[in-house]
Image (cartoon, rainbow, N blue to C red):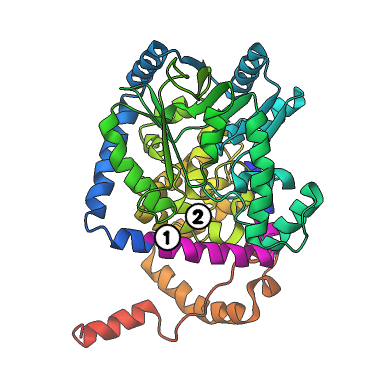
Amino acid sequence: MRPRSDQFHELSSEALEDSFLREALKRASSSFHAAKTDAVDSMPDWEELRQRGHDRKNRAIENLPEALEVFEKNLRSRGGEVHYCEDGAAARDQVLSIIRSSGGRSVTKSKSMVTEEIALNDHLEAAGLSVLEGDLGEYIIQLAGEHPSHIIAPAIHKSREEVAELFHDHLGSDPDADIPELTRVARETLREAFLGADIGISGANFVIAETGTIVLVENEGNIRMSTTVPRVHIAVVGIEKVLPRRSDLAALLRLLCRSATGQRVTSYISFISSPRTGGEGDGPEKLHVVFLDAGRSRLWADPTQREALNCIRCGACLNFCPVYGSVGGHSYGWVYPGPIGSVITPHYVGIEKASQLPQASSLCGRCGEVCPMKIPLPDMLLGLRAKAVEAGSAGFSEKLSMRVFSLLARSPRLWRLLLALGRPFYRLVARAGLASILGGAARRWSRSRSLPLPGRSGFRRWWREDSERGGE
């Protein structure tokens, strides 16, 4: 998937015209909100758990080079292979090399954001291989020729009717099929692919250095079909997924499941530490772990942004972000949407190619509040905005507006005068619609925003009157 992160304004404007998308996002967000709230309310020690998870992941990231070495040593001791790749191109070539050396022709994949990041499917298909996504959501968007719109719910933007039409066109099923029937059709198709695949490819939620173990979390059970049935299992993993000790895992799993889906624990958690041994009846003959850097070392080297590597890909920041909730994941132009995507994408593809993403936030702070790892996302977004300006992304109108604001903010008299004069005008444009009155850059800015009418009493007047009453 070619990054289009420099086109957020264009893509988000298109998304705002899609009324169905906005309604689908609204329904999904409400569901995620309710599930997470219930899960958190049932845990009196939630904040303590967040702090524990934050501390353990921080320690893991601080000791990342050492943890990678320990993991490699322990996996190799059990017959696994470890490969390090500096960028996406190297990782794609490494995976293809492993497949060719094993004589593989057909591939089944589990849900993996990092393989989306490196556009692995396109690379393998161009080499003549058959590649099928095993996760139901990923399978749906593969049929649609699209990319995930959400970290944990790839097809969140699709309706049942759209899925039924896709299945009818590609699989010959009933165009009016209901959800149980669609699930049955997908299960039959995917099961046949699982049983015939030579190669299974997965990502990893965590890898544990102490034991050389890959940890995979899922609800459908399809990951196990991709990691146990084929002769060769290849796990493509971002280097930030390494935990030093097995004891670090429990807290992170509790945080992940509750933050992602509101579950106490997910349906399936798999631990893979080696290829099949002599006494086992199933499992791959070969196990390869392909570690990907692709900008992660640059992020690790930035002390003000490093904590972004603590992300456990739960999607909570997306679910509570008003910007994501309005425009969806495809507007961000690459694999990682929402607040976390706006932070890590500039590091992975370069701030010059993603300078618009740090602006894709209202800075309401909700993402930082709900992040189970306590990542200070609003602070990071502000830091990246500064870096984008340093890189020359600010245009003339932005520079001029900031200078005017700076002047007003330093002059209380001018500020009060502007408020007094601007309040009637604001009420006028808010009633009439901003885009119908404003022109030029202001019209473009206002087209995607609807501002509330101000109250009859401004804050300063309210404060003065309240103070005169003695704060009662």
Res 364 label: 1
21 inside magenta stretch = yes
Give the quarter of the image for residue 37: bottom left
Task: Pick the residue in front: 386 or 277.
Answer: 277
Residues 274 and 457: in front is 274
Task: Kindly identify which numbered label has been placed on residue 361.
Answer: 2
Q: How many marks?
A: 2
Q: For the residue labelled by badge 1, is the local secondary structure a helix, a strand or a loop?
A: loop
Query: Dividing the image into 4 quarters, which one contains the C terminus?
Result: bottom left
Query: Looking at the image, which residue is at 63% across and 22% down?
Result: 92
Crowding around mark 1 (Cα neighbors within 10 Å: few <14, some 14 to 19, many 20+) is few
Q: Amino acid at mark 2?
A: Ser
| Displayed quadrant of residue 444 | bottom right
In the rendering, at what x and y percent does residue 95 appear? 61, 20
Which residue corresponds to the image point at 35% horizontal and 32% vertical from the top-left? Answer: 303
**Nearest the eye: 223 or 248:** 223
Question: Which residue type does callout 1 highlight?
Answer: Cys
Q: Quadrant of the N terminus?
A: top right
Magenta range is 12-36
Residue 291 location, x and y as percent?
A: 49, 22
Do callouts 1 and 2 mark residues in contact (Cβ within 8 Å)?
yes
Magenta highlight: main SS: helix
Q: Secondary structure at mark 2?
A: loop
Residues at marks 1 and 2, CA–CA distance in whole angstroms? 8 Å
Q: Position of residue 103 (x, y in %)?
A: 68, 14
Q: Is residue 411 left or right of residue 171?
A: left
Tell me, yes or no, if residue 120 can be seen here: no
